[in-house]
Amino acid sequence: MINGSKVLDHPIRWAMVGGGKGSQIGYIHRSAALRDNNFQLVAGAFDINPERGMAFAAELGIDPDRCYPDYKTMFEKEAQREDGIEAVSIATPNSVHYEVCKAALEAGIHVVCEKPLCFSTEEGEELVALAKKKNLVVGVTYGYSGHQMIQQARQMIKNGDLGDIRVINMSFAFGGYNYKIEETNAAAKWRFDPKKAGPSFAMADVGTHCLYIIEAMIPDMKIDKVLCSKDAFVEGRELEDNAFTLMRLNGSEHVQEGAKVYCWSSSINCGARHGHVIRVVGSKASIEWDDERPNQMTYEIEGEPVRRLERGAGYLYEEARVEDRIGGGHAEGLFEAWANLYRRFALAIEGMSKGEEEYGDFWYPDVEAGLAGVKWIEKCVESANNGEVWVKY
Ligand code: NAD
């Protein structure tokens, strides 16, 4: 159980790039990082507009000397301080992730980066190699994977409760982008600009969350090939607002050879909120998890009544209970899931700094997971652009 007890020798001196005033995701980064006192917000370059960013940093209580106009100045000035930053989170539009991540690693700073990590596998591989060379953590905020029921699913699959996995049916298909929202909403506008968003909108924005969740549930999962069909249904969009992806998996310990995964990534699913549901079908049983009801997961054994597993319950695997913060019955949510991830990032940073490499089943979305998401987007786009054909992974 997490109850605020001290975990690290000292809180990690932490900064943010992006996530400025009015941004969609900045607040949850701060809430999650600061929740357990493992990080201390000491500096920031929060905004594309330097004045606005510095004013916001001051509003957050940051020392005026450490409210920076841009990330380059921040890394340079912080390197000159004895108490300079040790970690930085990047919560900017996608096009900025790679350059800031690379600059941070070169400056010897651990990174938490928004997804997608970068635009191409070449860039991703470079970041993987750099993080390794510098012995630094790169965490990626696939925030939903911090929910406790994802841990439960991982253990159930590992222990063979589902038998061999044959089918995964998943979606992150939200509504609200069924008209030109980008004409009035700045955060939607950059998402359809390939220079700022990269080669994909719907798959990069939400499909990668599904992908990482199943990677977390099935750590040895290997994609053999992908087939993708994507569309921009709303006229004038340069990037897809809807995509269907079919994947064939190689066999592994708990995956039947040729298992199929279906992923619907969408922003035009009228009437839906998130539409983010993961159903894993094995040879003995199925599980289903919905991000809008994250405290529950159904467990359906063939021939038996449906069971609804509840977060925090004693019958869950131990791994699914260690991050319980308030006891079963109380609803935990996305803020707790993110806090769990930030806690793991902090533990990984401390472990890495002390040279501890063995974490047991301790896991977090790392730089390899970031690269995996980028590769998936690349392969899906290749498949769709080549006439919706199977593409070898
Ligand atoms: P947003 O447009 O709402 O905010 C972006 C922020 O970055 C703004 O404050 C902007 O001023 C700042 N910024 C832009 N360029 C900058 C630069 N060069 N230096 C410093 N600051 C800069 O965007 P958002 O919706 O918050 O998305 C930001 C990132 O978070 C995206 O990569 C997006 O994919 C990701 N995101 C992730 C999740 C998740 O669940 N993990 C959810 C939403 C968004």
Image (tube, rainbow, N blue to C red):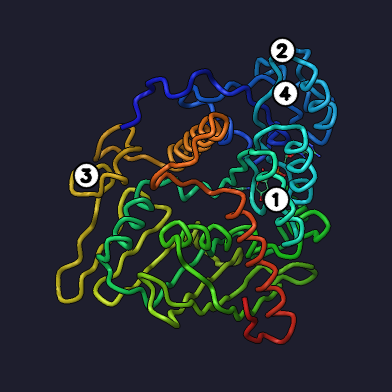
Point out the quarter of the image occupied by ligand 1: top right
* Pointer 3 residue: 313
Q: Which mark is residue 192?
A: none
Task: Please provide percent x and percent y for residue 216.
Answer: 45, 56
* Pointer 4 residue: 56
In terms of secondary structure, where does tag 1 sit? Answer: helix
Q: Are marks 2 and 3 in contact (CB under 8 Å)?
A: no
Q: Are marks 1 and 2 in contact (CB under 8 Å)?
A: no
Seen from the viewer's position, the closer of residues 208 and 332 is 208
3D distance between C-alphas at marks 2 and 3: 43 Å
3D distance between C-alphas at marks 4 and 1: 34 Å
| Three-letter code, disc 3 | Ala
First along the sequence among labels 4 and 1? 4
Image quarter where the C terminus lies is bottom right
Front disc: 4 or 2: 2
Front disc: 1 or 3: 1
Task: Please provide percent x and percent y for residue 11.
Answer: 54, 20
Q: Are marks 4 and 1 in contact (CB under 8 Å)?
A: no
Q: Are marks 4 and 2 in contact (CB under 8 Å)?
A: no
Is residue 274 depicted above or below 64 in this figure? below
3D distance between C-alphas at marks 4 and 2: 12 Å
Instruction: Decide if ligand 1 comes within 8 Å of the CB at mark 3.
Output: no
Front disc: 1 or 2: 1
First along the sequence among labels 1 and 2? 2
* Pointer 2 residue: 63
Seen from the viewer's position, the closer of residues 361 and 344 is 361
| Three-letter code, disc 1 | Ala
- The residue at 39%/47% (across/down) is 361
| Three-letter code, disc 2 | Asp
Q: Quadrant of residue 181?
A: bottom right
In terms of secondary structure, where does tag 4 sit? Answer: helix
* Pointer 1 residue: 129
